[in-house]
Image (spheres, helix red, strand yellow):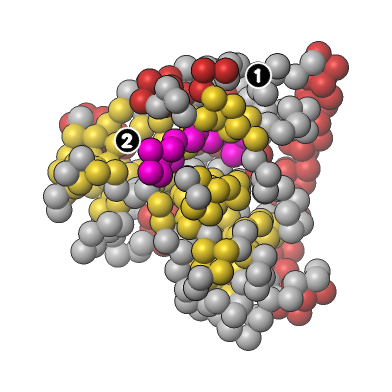
Amino acid sequence: MNGFDAPRSARAWQARLSGIIGITLVAGLLLAFSAMSAAANPDRWRSEGWKTDFSLSSIDFASVMSGGPPRDGIPPIDDPVFLPVSEASGLDAMEPVMSVAIDGKARAYPLRIMIWHEIVNDNLAGQPVSVTYCPLCNAAIVFERTIDGEVTSFGTTGKLRNSDLVMYDRATESWWQQFTGEAITGSRTGTSLKVIPSRLESWQSFRQRFPDGQVLVPGNPGLRDYGRNPYAGYDSSSVPFLYRGPMPEGISPLSYVVVVRDGPEPVAIALDRLRREGKISSNGIEIEWLAGVRSVLDTGAIEEGREIGSVNVTRDGTPVAHELTFAFVVRAFLPGTAILK
């Protein structure tokens, strides 16, 4: 058993569950739009059981809306299970994985799992980390989960802001914006998480770079329809889900954009531009396009998704934190940053 494959009966249940989840997602989207104004209210959130200190906040609460599921309705993984790369199978060679390497230890977190769980609370090379992925923003970001000397873990609030995952820490129940890594309400408002460099690459690329690495596998392969994208066709849509903010100019809102925030000013480059040029240098940072990586948000079956490629970002050969996200995300969270098209 390689961790990715399930028995035939489990697969049948997966298919049924996938349909249920798909219907639930659509219903959740419609419900969220109809109730977004009423739901963006601390009194309403307290009635849901939140112990968050909503008197401290850096945002307009009206910008927060329900994503459909309740708190941890998209369940984070707190006890991740891994296999050695040499023992894992069932992944397409071009499937995207989030890869993280710390002190010579490397792990891959396939997006076929992350898309259903969004957060993995892990320990890598003795360092507590939270591996996060927001499908609606295609934002794959890894954070340290030690805050002011205290190790915590993160869960999903069931809320969105600018279509981006809002997380919460289990120590104070402060809410955190996933794309910025900043606490937006609660006792930790204004605190920022430290980002750990990671990258999106193909499963084949990770295996070649880290033959002694490990890969995340489902603890319960029958729990979700792993390998299926519940947001089929999303990155070909004309508008993002549950987004009310301004749209970018001169580029489709769901065009892929590389964002690098490790410098005096953020840099944003359209992936199409990077694909044409192959490599772009900015402020001593090398940003290189990589072939052979599928979109996880294209077709219903992830292994059939179109090739979009990915990126590698380095400074003097050292990995630099970056995101491969969408143009509307840049407009929402980095409004003063022009996208190089």
> Which quadrant is home to the C terminus?
top left
Q: Which residue reaches farthest bottom?
A: 55
Judge whether 295 appears above or below 253 on screen: above
The residue that mark 1 highlights is 2
User: In front: mark 2 or mark 1?
Assistant: 1
Asked if the magenta segment contains residue 111, the reply would be: yes
Asked if the magenta segment contains residue 35, the reply would be: no
**Is 323 placed left or right of 339 in the picture?**
right
Judge whether 321 appears above or below 305 on screen: below
- Secondary structure of the residue carrying tag 1 is loop
| Label 1 Cα neighbours within 10 Å, binned few <14 / some 14-19 / many ≥20 | few
- Which quadrant of the figure has residue 112? top right
**Is 266 placed left or right of 237 in the picture?**
left
Provide residue 278's location: percent of width, then percent of height. 20, 30
The structure residue drawn at horizontal position 80% and vertical position 69%, both measured from the top left corner, is 48
Disc number for residue 11: none
The structure residue drawn at horizontal position 59% and vertical position 27%, both measured from the top left corner, is 83
Judge whether 218 appears above or below 122 on screen: above
The boundaries of the magenta stretch are 100-115
Disc number for residue 311: 2
> Which quadrant is home to the N terminus?
top right
Confirm whether residue 57 shows in the render. yes
Provide residue 69's location: percent of width, then percent of height. 75, 52
